Image (cartoon, rainbow, N blue to C red):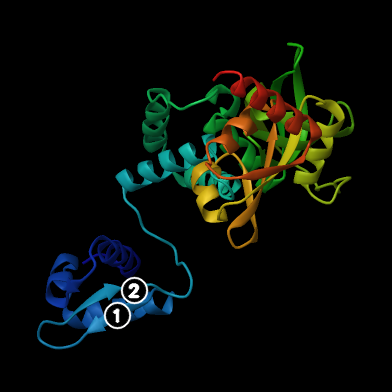
Amino acid sequence: MANTSTRTLRLLSLLQTHRYWPGAELADRLGVSARTLRRDIDRLRELGYPVQAQRGVDGGYQLAAGAALPPLVIDDEEAVALAVGLQAAAQNPVEGIAESSVRVLAKVVQVMPVRLRRRIDALRVMTVSAGWGNPAKAAADPSVLTTIALTCRDNERIRFTYTAADGRTTERHAEPHRLVSLGHRWYLVAYDLTRHDWRSFRIDRLSDPQSTGARFRPRDLPTADAAEFIQSSLDNVSPQSYRTQVLVHAPAEEVRTRIGRWATVEETEPGQCMVYMMTDSLDWPIMAVGTLDADFRVISPPELLTRFHTLGTRFTRAQ
């Protein structure tokens, strides 16, 4: 008979693989008596797992939904599937879950055996994602995101190679603060130890991040949070970037389904919502809003309204 801890984990794994287990069959799979099985079930309940029991000759057990999410036990195949799915979510962020995907991915990869990491890397390298537009702009290596997320979490200094917009490459030594997903790009907010100031770094221009293992005491950001720091940085150094705001006369949920991956959608009233986008080109929000098949009104910037008028005139001449 396995020791109690090992047997409890085995029991939990079995309960997660089937909706319902007859008591006799479950005890047989574990190689224990019905009485020992009941004690193990009680132990899981004490740990917060809501196990329901059905009494009688044909009685058994099943794992029910609880008020909180307890730890899960997953096998190798499930771990690989989970990590690959999180990588996909990080590369093609869906509104509201991009940063969460990276945090969970960092936790999973940290405890994953090397043999499974190799399988995940092979899947990532040999898989090509297809989509409309320019996917290269949104590309962010999940392994880079994971490494940076861990250094942010553990307050460990990091070294990496960074390529600026003009093509110059420099070696950076920094204290990472937060990863931010904004528009279709990922950014790192960090304190640059060479320049002795806060900086933002585009992840698609960052390569070979390595933790130095040196811990640091977190500094105070000059803004309320990392997202505000990125937005203010873009305002100062990227005059070609646009923050667009469009009022769309369509239900928010319907709009999220269509373009929620690339925009922030907020309901203003039933059947109407506000769509926000951060982009380097006005062509993309024009195309996104145009696919909604709904009336809309441009709130900002004025350049977007002008662009709509220009295209509208051109389309009218195409009769």
Q: Position of residue 72 (x, y in %)?
A: 40, 60
74 shown above or below 58: above
Q: CA distance from mark 1 to mark 2?
A: 6 Å
Type of amino acid under label 1: Gln
- As drawn, the residue found furthest toward the top would be 167
Residue holding disc 1: 52
Q: Position of residue 81 (x, y in %)?
A: 36, 43
Residue drawn 71% across the image and 28% down it: 309
Mark 1 neighbour density, 10 Å: few (under 14) some (14–19) many (20 or more): some
225 shown above or below 138: below
- Cβ–Cβ below 8 Å for labels 1 and 2? yes
Residue drawn 21% across the image and 71% down it: 20
Residue holding disc 2: 64
Marking on residue 287 = none
Q: Which quadrant of the figure has residue 214? A: top right
* Mark 1 or mark 2: whose residue is earlier in sequence: 1
Residue drawn 12% across the image and 71% down it: 25
Type of amino acid under label 2: Ala
Which of these two is toward me, 304 or 76? 304
Answer whether residue 224 is visible to the viewer in this image: yes
81 shown above or below 74: above
